[in-house]
Amino acid sequence: MSTAPAARSGGPGNELVPLLPRISRRTLLAGTGAAVVAALAGCGGSSSAGPDPARQLRIGAIPDQDPEVLQRLHATVADSLADALGIPVEYRPVTDYAAAVSLFRTGDLDLVWFGGLTGVQARLQTPGAVPVAQRDIDADFHSVFVVNSSTGVTPADDLRPLADLRFTYGSQTSTSGRLMPAYFLREAGVDPEGFPGGPGFSGSHDSTLALVASGTYQAGAVNEQVWLARSAAGEVDPAVVAYARTPGYHDYHWLLGPRAAERLGGPDRLTAHFTGLSPDRPADAIVLDLFGAGAFIPTEAANYRRIEEIGRDLGLVS
């Protein structure tokens, strides 16, 4: 496993990680060198102007995993979308969860892979934003509480023994790494903010695993998909063990901005693309595998009403 970044409590909240625009294979292979230059430069502009925003789709994602994992995942999605829609699609990494919400609100990102909580925040701040699709696993998603084996705490359904451990969440606005773990801790009688020294915020699920492995924190919460994927790949330190699994909840989904929805004539083409991905087609299977999903399914704002209610109750949604 790559070295995870140090624990952090957030960033400036409005920055993109610099990256050259990603142009799809279809654009690069469609014609002459002049066509490639036109695609890179935008509609009739100079080579330094970049693609015309009105003729491209800019996608992003909350940075919940290591950057190289996200780059591989969403660069593949960009290619898939570009081939399906016939327009340039660019993946733009962001610095933190707040940046994804902010850049979606300003229209600098058109389509973003949000967690449940950040999706609610972005939708409330961006009138006209539309949920497009979620994975099959997001209809019943789970978090996993992990502990360092040196604590002597053994797996159980009772969350109360976690109260005495140094504990870290992921990002402050992570659904699976903070919001829902905090909710279930409170339901179990544990003050979600009352850990010795106060809770930490690692910034991502991979960072949480690294911090618990090192003993910097004795316990933490991660999303189940990351836990299973890293465990299957042999990338989890043996010192880190699963303690408990939460009940299910709705989580990740694609959210489309109102300006992009207008350009595309609504969300239907995107919903059809994602829900039409089939594991029987090799190119589609790659996308589904990278997302850890068997399929994408339609979704709607009502699916995240519980997330919104819990977020308001915990002071994470205003």
Image (tube, grey):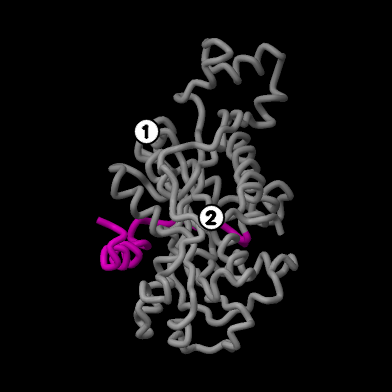
Where residue 268 sits in the image (x, y, percent)? 45, 43
In the rendered image, residue 303 lying in the magenta stretch gets the answer yes
Q: Which residue is mark 1?
A: 259
214 displayed left or right of 195: right
Q: Is residue 58 above or below residue 68?
A: above
Q: In this rendering, which labeled residue sits more in front, label 2 or label 1?
A: 2
Q: Residue at x 58, y 50 (%)?
A: 276
The region drawn magenta spans: 292-318
Callout 1 amino acid: Arg
Where residue 142 sits in the image (x, y, percent)? 50, 72
Q: Residues within 10 Å of mark 1 (few under 14, many from 20)?
A: some
Quarter of the rendering occupied by the C terminus: bottom left
Q: Residue at x 42, y 76 (%)?
A: 196
Q: Residue at x 63, y 56 (%)?
A: 4
Quarter of the rendering occupied by the N terminus: bottom right
Contact check, label 2 and label 1, Cβ < 8 Å: no
Q: Secondary structure at mark 1?
A: helix
In the rendered image, residue 4 lying in the magenta stretch gets the answer no
Seen from the viewer's position, the closer of residues 138 and 187 is 187
288 displayed left or right of 29: left
* Furthest residue toward front: 197
Q: Is residue 112 above or below residue 294?
A: above
Numbered badge on residue 275: none
Where residue 190 sits in the image (x, y, percent)? 37, 82
Task: Please report whichever mark, 2 or 1, sits nearer to the chain's N-terminal start.
Answer: 2
Q: Which residue is mark 2?
A: 64
94 displayed left or right of 238: left
Callout 2 amino acid: Asp
Give the spatial CA distance, label 2 vs label 1.
Answer: 26 Å
Seen from the viewer's position, the closer of residues 261 and 233 is 233
Q: Residue at x 45, y 83 (%)?
A: 164
